[in-house]
Amino acid sequence: SNGCQNCHPGPGGNTLVCGDSSARDTSVAFEMTFRIYFVKKGRIEFTYKKDSVRERDGWVSGIFSLFVDDISVLDDNNLLDDPLEWKKFGMDVYPGMKEISFVY
């Protein structure tokens, strides 16, 4: 086992929980990609927690990223964040088919 768990709905179905992974178990603890068609201008909003740490060799573990149509719109590797604190992100999205990928 590589330490990863399958993603599953959180309590009430309003969240998606994607297990735990120890540093260096995998290069990506999870990656989720959705294809969504926006009929009109909309918004992507979510809250997240992450734990970024610098390893002894300088490698940063725990980078949380969001890509829209293969363009990085969020790349959070802040080492000073409290891993128990929820962070918020939001951005406008224009009409059309979008490919949205969360990577951690």
Image: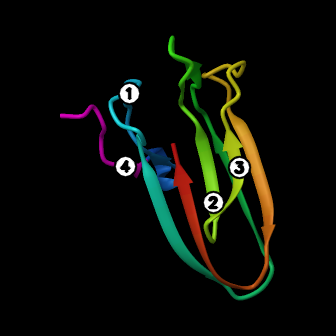
Q: Disc 3 on helix, strand or loop?
A: strand
Numbered mark located on residue 67 in the image: 2
Q: Distance between the residues labelled 4 and 3?
A: 21 Å
The answer to whether marks 2 and 4 mark residues whose Cβ atoms lie closer than 8 Å is: no
Badge nearest the viewer, 1 or 3: 1
The answer to whether marks 1 and 3 mark residues whose Cβ atoms lie closer than 8 Å is: no
Q: Mark 3 points at which residue?
A: 74
Q: How far apart are marks 3 and 2 (CA)?
A: 7 Å
Residue 77 x %, y %: 66, 32
Q: Disc 2 on helix, strand or loop?
A: strand
Q: How crowded is mark 4: few (under 14 residues within 10 Å), some or many (20 or more)?
A: some
Q: Name the residue under label 4.
A: 7
Q: Distance between the residues labelled 2 and 4?
A: 19 Å
Q: Is residue 77 left or right of residue 103?
A: right
Q: Which amino acid does label 4 sit on?
A: Cys
Badge nearest the viewer, 2 or 4: 2
